[in-house]
Amino acid sequence: MTDASMQTPETGRRGTSLTATDERTRKRARAEKRFRFYGIIAIATGLFFLVVLFASILKEGIPAFTRTVVSVEFTLTPEQREEAEGTLFKTKAYSDLFIAELNKELAESGINVDFDEAAIERLLGKVGGTIRTFYADNPDKLGEPIMFDLAASSRVDGYFKGRVSRDTLQDSRFLQLSDLDLVDALKEAGIIKQAFNWPFITGADSGVDNPGGAGIGASVVGSFFMMLVVLVLSLPIGVAASIYLEEFAPQNKFTDLIEVNISNLAAVPSIVFGILGLAVFIQFMHLPQSAPLVGGLVLTLMTLPTIIISTRASLKAVPPSIRDAALGVGASKMQAVFHHVLPLAAPGILTGTIIGLAQALGETAPLLLIGMVGFVARGYPDGFLAGFTEPNSAMPAQIYTWAARADVGFYEKAWGGIIILLMFLLTMNIIAIILRRRFERRW
Amino acid sequence: MNDMSRVERQVDTNSIKLECRDCQVYYGDTHAIKDVNVDIEDKTVTAFIGPSGCGKSTFLRCLNRMNDTIDIARVMGSFKLDGEDIYDKRVDPVQLRAKVGMVFQKPNPFPKSIYDNVAYGPRIHGLAKNKAELDEIVEKSLRRGAIWDEVKDRLDAPGTGLSGGQQQRLCIARAVATEPEVLLMDEPCSALDPIATAQVEELIDELRSRYSVVIVTHSMQQAARVSQKTAFFHLGNLVEFGETGQIFTNPEDPRTESYITGRIG
Ligand SMILES: Nc1ncnc2c1ncn2[C@@H]1O[C@H](COP(=O)(O)OP(=O)(O)OP(=O)(O)O)[C@@H](O)[C@H]1O
Ligand SMILES: [Mg+2]
């Protein structure tokens, strides 16, 4: 490049050996090496943060999938029931029977520990009520031995998971130091143990003072109905709009304006869509509050631009010669699009749709505005149609609600909820990849 | 086609199939075709020759309204197929293109099987009543495209998996499968070896007995071999149009002479 190099006497490459690399080649080789190094650093950094993120999510969230249960085999004879029902404090009578059974089992294991009814209540809540309700619902189970799996209270659960220790525990109405002796004894006898937390996966949200009973199941169902609305509305509308804009619409100022607006819509913060949903769907159209239907409508507005943009990109990527070929043999424009262009664009459209859905699945802010907050998810909807209209929450909103609660027991639930949410997202991505593979033509 | 029409056709042999008057094409501000007047006769092969970029493809695309698909292209003038203006508002280009088929300059098979490539046209036009008839059309078309022997064992293989020359012959087969009345061929042999070229030329000769063929070519020999009429384009103008023998042996315009003798191009 420099004047000096241009004036060198040996012009051309004649006479130089191929094995002796010259300065320019070496310089280029060094530049390439440096660039590869930067690339590897960038990827390594990304991977590092990803690993840290996943590790911390798993570390904090995994405990949410186990719970501490007290398993006691208990038999209630019809006479015992009659007698208990005859007393004034009925649940206390059941509770006494349970404590007697527990004492017997402890004695069988050769363990001797003192405890009273209050301690049992601190450990297991109102046992008597639980047992009474069970037999009221299942009178045919009377006289049979029944295995009762009773969830231990949040503090006891924390003791098992290391959140609560003997050194830090202060006696309170929730848990006393002496209760831990009972817990240890029960543990030794194999009566109290850790088990997989099915209620977390299948259950609904609990009250603010009962983190142990909180489950994400109801809000998973809420998310499902919402996604159904989003898919059913945004896929056909988005694809039809894209096909029209890309293949049929005349190129003029008006379509340019629409195009710019769609691109801008994709960048509008989600909370704006939330406000819009609140104003239009709930306040103006009087659709039910906190309903997955409304959530789905709001998320549809958000997802549409994503789907339209990706669909148009994949339509644009189909070579124009394919359209010419179809038109050339006398296909109509519509036939050219639906027989030839759309099948080629399908993998891209699918990927865009699933990415849009995944975004919608993780969206929180607009849901809070239309009332799909976590504590609404108190149970499963009764029936398919009710799933759209009955108040419910969605996974991210549920997680947000848990994370905002005071009891540390909810902290773990929030992380556990994130794991579930990520699993759904992962599944959606895998489905996207599989569909892509299936639709992609191997030629 | 039935016998009636064949008889009728024989009567008006060499009648004018496509009559083009004062044709202009603009791409935006570029004037690509200027005042072109051509009569394309029935049952005749017409060759378009001329240097690259002179507007041969552009003019060819006017004849089946493929320029409609280019937003910036504007076509003016009168184009009459059997006396009917093809740019009339009432004309559906779809119907026109079924009558005026086209083979494109770059091979563009559908990313579907070889069979489906050829069967697509007959299917959408309802030319076959059943699978057997469709099979017959596909075989006949592939034979006419001089590619049957190469692909008869792999009709389910993708058309895009063929070599460039095979793809072009597949496109020819696809174009003839719909039985067009006029076949426009834009450099159909530019990617073919001499044997395939000879086969395609044979096909063109065969088609001439029933259809009118317009072929764009860069090969003077080919134009001389297959065509009866030749049109020489230069910079968007139709310089000379006449009997092929006349053009190649005794051109009127000095530009034509220098082009066919290889001095401009
Ligand atoms: N889609 C288009 N947009 C703008 N200009 C175009 C377009 N297609 C062709 N042109 C212009 O029109 C002129 C004629 O092009 P055309 O393709 O008809 O040439 P041709 O004679 O077929 O050339 P070749 O022998 O190389 O195929 C050229 O100057 C080209 O630049
Ligand atoms: Mg051309």
Image: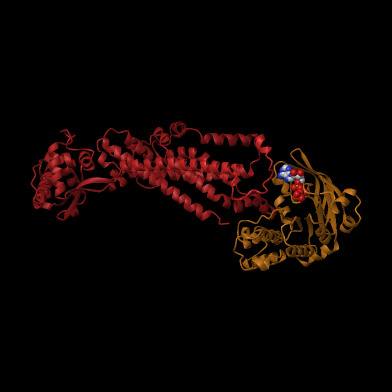
Chain colours: A red, B orange
Q: Image quadrant of residue B1?
A: bottom right
Q: Which of B38 and A229 is in front in this view?
A: B38
Vertical placement of residue B97 versus A233, above or below: below
Q: Nearer the viewer, residue B243 or A256?
A: B243
Task: Answer yes or no: is residue A204 visible.
Answer: no
Q: Position of residue A375 (x, y in %)?
A: 32, 36
Q: Image quadrant of residue A410?
A: top left
Q: Image quadrant of residue A163?
A: top left
Q: Where is residue B245 in the image (x, y as percent from the top left)?
A: 88, 59
Q: Residue sitting at 52 percent across and 43 percent down? A: A33
Task: Answer yes or no: is residue B114 visible.
Answer: yes
Q: Residue sitting at 68 percent across and 38 percent down? A: A6
Vertical placement of residue B150 versus A249, above or below: below
Q: Position of residue A54 (x, y in %)?
A: 37, 43
**Where is the N terminus of chain A found, in terms of image quarters?**
top right
Q: Residue sitting at 14 percent across and 37 percent down? A: A177
Q: Position of residue A97 (x, y in %)?
A: 11, 47
Q: Nearer the viewer, residue A285 or B28?
A: B28
**Where is the C terminus of chain A found, in terms of image quarters?**
bottom right
Question: Is residue A42 left or right of A423 when viewed as pictured?
Answer: right
